[in-house]
Image (cartoon, rainbow, N blue to C red):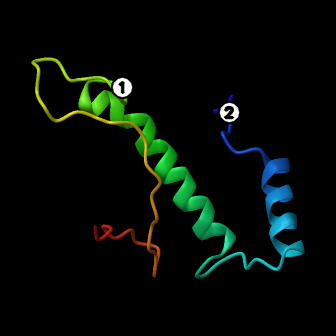
């Protein structure tokens, strides 16, 4: 037996139909693929951050270090191609 797909074909079809009905391009700047890629990557990274840092948002790291996570802030990604670039602060 094959592995179960994490992608729901019905959900994909619904997203494509909604994008087309709303005049959203499927590819390119501001397109559905760009928006989905951004959200999937941000969600995956946000989920890995507690493991990487060793504590949850708002918690202080062990050892009393002053640098700790103060929660969540909104992010804006700037995309010009399929490659992600660091954000200027």
Q: Is residue 63 left or right of residue 69?
A: left
Decide: is 60 above or below 79: above
> At 39% from the left edge and 68% from the top edge, which residue is drawn?
84
Q: Name the image quarter holding residue 57.
A: top left
Circle on res. 4: 2
Name the quarter where the N terminus is drawn: top right
Q: x, y percentage for residue 69? A: 29, 35
Name the quarter where the C terminus is drawn: bottom left
Decide: is 89 above or below 12: below
Decide: is 37 above or below 72: below
Of 68 and 85, the residue lying toward us: 68
Q: Is residue 22 left or right of residue 68?
A: right
Q: Is residue 28 left or right of residue 68?
A: right
Q: x, y percentage for residue 28? A: 60, 81
Q: Name the image quarter holding residue 47.
A: top left
Q: Which residue is mark 1?
A: 56
Q: x, y percentage for residue 41? A: 48, 52
Please say if the residues under marks 1 and 2 sit with CB atoms less than 8 Å apart: no
Q: CA distance from mark 1 to mark 2?
A: 30 Å
Crowdedness near tag 1: few (<14), some (14–19) or many (≥20) residues, C-alpha within 10 Å: some
Mark 1 residue element: loop
Q: Is residue 87 left or right of residue 9?
A: left
Crowdedness near tag 2: few (<14), some (14–19) or many (≥20) residues, C-alpha within 10 Å: few
Please state which of the two labelled residues, at mark 1 or mark 2, is closer to the viewer. Answer: 1
Q: x, y percentage for residue 55? A: 30, 24
Circle on res. 39: none
> At 27% from the left edge and 33% from the top edge, which residue is drawn?
52
Mark 2 residue element: loop
How many numbered discs sit on the rendered protein?
2
Which tag, 1 or 2, sits closer to the chain's start?
A: 2
């Amino acid at each position: 037996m094959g592995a179960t797909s994490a992608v729901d074909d019905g959900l994909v079809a619904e997203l494509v139909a909604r994008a087309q009905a709303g005049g959203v391009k499927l590819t390119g700047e501001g397109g559905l693929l760009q928006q989905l890629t951004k959200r999937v990557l941000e969600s995956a990274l946000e989920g890995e951050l507690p493991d990487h840092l060793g504590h949850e948002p708002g918690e202080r790291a062990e050892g009393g270090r002053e640098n700790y996570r103060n929660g969540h802030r909104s992010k804006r990604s700037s995309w010009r191609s399929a490659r992600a670039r660091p954000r200027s602060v």
